[in-house]
Image (cartoon, rainbow, N blue to C red):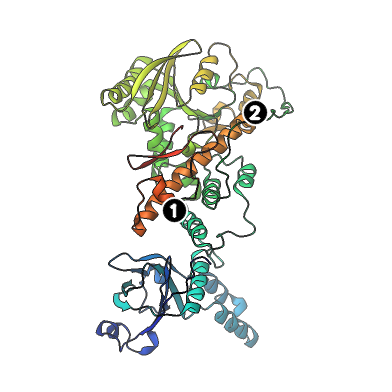
Amino acid sequence: MRCVQNRSFLAVVLVGCWLTGAMSALCPTATCALQIEAVAGEPFGIGRIVIPNSADLLPAELGVQGVSISTPDGRILYPVVELPPDNKMVTEILLGSPLMKGGPVREQAGGILRELLKPPPQTSLYFLFRGSEPLEVTLQMRDTQRFVVRPRANPPAYNRLFREWWRAYTAKPTGFFRPSGSYPPVVSNYLQAMLARRLGLPPAESEKEKSWQDQIEGQLGLFLGTEQVRLAVVRDRILGRLPSDETASLPLPTELDWPPLELPEPSDDVKTEPIANRVPAECLYVRFGSFANFLWLQDTLQKWGGDMSNLVALRGLDTGQSARMERQLVLKQTALGRMLGPTVISDVAIVGTDMFMREGGAFGILFEARNSFLLENDFKRQRSDLVKQGIATEKSVEIAGKKVSFLNSSDGAVRSFYLSDKGYIFVTTSETLMRRFIETSGEGASLGRSAEFRHARSVMPLTREDTVFVYLSDAFFRNMAGPHYWIEILRRLRAAADIELLEMASLASATEGKPGDTIEQLVAGEFLPPGFDPRGDGSRTELLDGAAVDSLR
């Protein structure tokens, strides 16, 4: 272990009712004493506080999970509480079962089970700290306790405590009912990987974990979010598993020879919605049928942080995704727009070539207008306001023979192609999507005119009046699995992971009180891996006015 040094110190303190008046009010007997060890070394010292699992000591609702530790000078870092298995629910179910009652054998079995599932009498709180001077510790339990810990020499204890701290810091949730996180493990994922590389510790992952390449190859259908893949990329990046000196010098692999899709021939009287005729065949298609249904989805997602993955994972985390999409497309929903929307919009659909929205997916919103004049005026007013405010610039670009309005900002927060064509208004982040939309005009190839979509509508007819109808075509999967798109997805994931990594590194350096205003300082402080930038395609992650951005995307 790199952090073990010849010079180290140890202190063992029993905090009991004989130590201070404040503690005597809390601990009427010496049996509820706190055992404290502290060892100083480089780059960090290590400490442990053994806390009795007593209802009189611990916070009323959170228990041991509500315990926190700090010092006025911020020297304590990376604390972790060694949590006992959460078997309370199982204990209540099993011990309340008739199988555990009625007869000496059953009663004896219940007693044995009760002892096995009983929580341990004490738990440990581990922490790292800087320096070897005395620590003025504030321990927040049911009441606030303050005491001073003075380290003393004992190298063997340093190694032992460090191993115990890392085991607790990287431990997975235990118990029969493992809680699912109410937020993505972004911080813990970064800290565990960063500290493992920095301190020469074994990475926090099990043998059953797959590499990020294996995960993404096995989860092509993960269209509502890429959390596990992104976390794996961050972990591999900081652990040095991803090469930083690659260059994009090879030609694209050959396209796969896909077999044709075999479907029964749909009847001639199958009805499809007109808006589907303006959707490119290779796009995902989320159709609402009315503006009211579109508002319903927006309001539902707003309750779950504006992110579809929150709805699936039952989370309330606000990633800012919904607001980011509105800002990028320049389609902000107003109170007047909500009121007048149904009178000027007859149908709405979200289209795109993937669902990696946080990583910069190609997507757009297609409106079928009842009143094109009023709808265009509202959209053009929003775009004009951004130009007047100096937030974005607008220019006319020619795409597939059409003059298209392109609004963009220097930081990429605004990127919006806009075109009104034959009663339809399309707003998208992608020039390619805009070109494909124009190509669907007239009798050109489109999703709505494809045999597979007509077959789908024969199975799920318009008479169902679905609030939301989602369709992923055969061409959509072929496009996503193609080498050109697959390589770009991997690049986008890595770029997004690097942004996340830079944000976490900046926060970690500030917590430790070390310089972190530049990428060079973060690499020197070992908060970022060596050779952090640039990437193989020439893009790099940059700090722009304190915010992490990608130079290309």
Q: Give left or right: position of 345 versus 482.
A: left
Front one among 521 and 423:
521
Q: Is residue 280 visible?
A: yes
- The circle drawn on residue 527 is 1
Query: Is disc 1 in contact with disc 2, using a CB cutoff of under 8 Å?
Result: no
Residue 374 rendering spot, x and y as whole percentages = 33, 17
Question: Which amino acid, by three-letter code, is at mark 1?
Answer: Phe
Question: Which amino acid, by three-letter code, is at mark 2?
Answer: Pro
Considering the numbered disc 2 on the image, is that residue within a helix, a strand or a loop?
loop
Residue at the spot 59% in from the left edge and 79% down from the top edge: 113
Q: Which residue in the structure is indicated by mark 2?
A: 251
Front one among 259 and 216:
216
Figure quadrant of residue 150? bottom left
- The circle drawn on residue 306 is none
Considering the numbered disc 1 on the image, is that residue within a helix, a strand or a loop?
loop
Residue 509 rendering spot, x and y as whole percentages = 38, 54
Front one among 256 and 242:
242
